Image (spheres, rainbow, N blue to C red):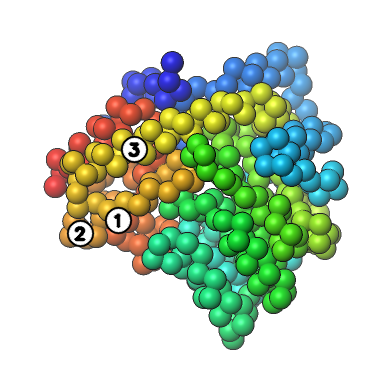
Amino acid sequence: MALFSLTEAELRTRTSLKWQVFDPDVLPLWVAEMDLHQHPAVVDAVTDAMRTGDTGYPWGTRYAEAYADMAEARWGWRPAPEQVRRSGDVMNAILALLVGNTAEGDHIVINPPVYPPFWQVIEGYRRHITQVPLTASGRLDLAALEAAFTGPDAPAAYLLCSPHNPNGTVHTADELAAVGRLCAEHGVLLVVDEIHAVLVDPGTTFTPVLTVPEAQHAVVAFSAGKGWNLAAFKAGLFIRGTQARAAFDNLPPLANQSTSQMGTIAHTAALRHAQGWVDEVMVEVAANKRLLGELLADRLPGVSWTPAPGTYLAWLDCSALGLDSPRNHFLTRARVALNDGTDFGADYGQFVRMNLATAPAIITETVERMAASL
């Protein structure tokens, strides 16, 4: 049976953000939650912990060990134990790294369009954003990065999303090596969000930044929360390169204290027992990407989309439709909730982000509603 087979009626019994923010007649294809049941091993691990009262504070390195085993099996690379520490989740890890390793007023580089919390974690903690947008083809602009690193507002850190959210770009080993060299040459701390690391299409090679020799001064923020749909269970990891000890030494005192016991249990079970499950998720996501491409060509030719192999998200260009706000139009006229492109950067108001981790029937109805609204 397909993993993405839950009906809209079944999904509307959920109390999480995705299914509760909008009115019941709105199809929500926005926030990055997946519409499926959990892997049985994760359910059993959490259920057993609750049944036995194993609900105290987390202890030990089992999550880190499970990550290391996965990295070795999946990517042929294994961090040493001293390279991994626990965190609360990816954004809390990034916050801790920026607070501990940069100062108020420092500049931080990001690549718009990019995940909205990247903007918030920088500006909300009194750092300044230096924007180096992706190229027109959705890739890193290495020349523009070098210019930013040597400009009058030279940054203290570079916050990279890998794979990239929202457009799904998977950075190559050569691109990451070039980024690593630039950061090392200019003394820029490289912080990499790899929460989508396992969410790549079948046959796609994902390169963890710490497998790249030139990037050993980088620090990665990782969590099983996205790949295994475990946002409800807060847990994550810091993983540093062999030359990034100082970044760990500068972490704030409570940086490692926000991991939850239940999160540790759930995430560890996912990493240990559900590797094949997440690969099957991406087989179905790849099929949903093909379906969306066909539906857009047939029903919404005015919407432009370049499929990419990372994430289960689609970044749709609605410029040709002539709408003031595509997101608002589709919400009010089609009763479809998508992410507003402006949340990913001020210049992207003609874009919307669509979540494809759902049943094909829901994707089909979504596009049909969007087409009918025009």
Q: Quadrant of residue 248?
A: bottom right
**Circle nearer the N terminus (3, 2):** 3
**Circle nearer the N terminus (1, 3):** 3
- Residue at 43%, 60% in the rendered image: 138
Q: Is residue 148 above or below residue 247?
A: below
Q: Which residue is mark 2?
A: 320
Local SS, label 2: helix
User: In the drawing, does residue 334 fall left or right of residue 269?
Assistant: left
Q: Residues within 10 Å of mark 2 (few under 14, many from 20)?
A: few
How far apart are the two marked residues, 1 and 3, measured between alpha carbons?
17 Å
**Residue type at the position of mark 2:** Ala
Local SS, label 3: helix
How far apart are the two marked residues, 3 and 2, measured between alpha carbons?
22 Å
Observer able to see residue 94: no
Where residue 93 appears, as percent x and y from the top left, is 68, 51
Q: Quadrant of residue 198?
A: top right
Q: Which residue is mark 1?
A: 317
Instruction: Tell me whether the residue at label 1 lies in contact with that at label 2, contact meaning CB atoms closer than 8 angstroms.
Output: yes
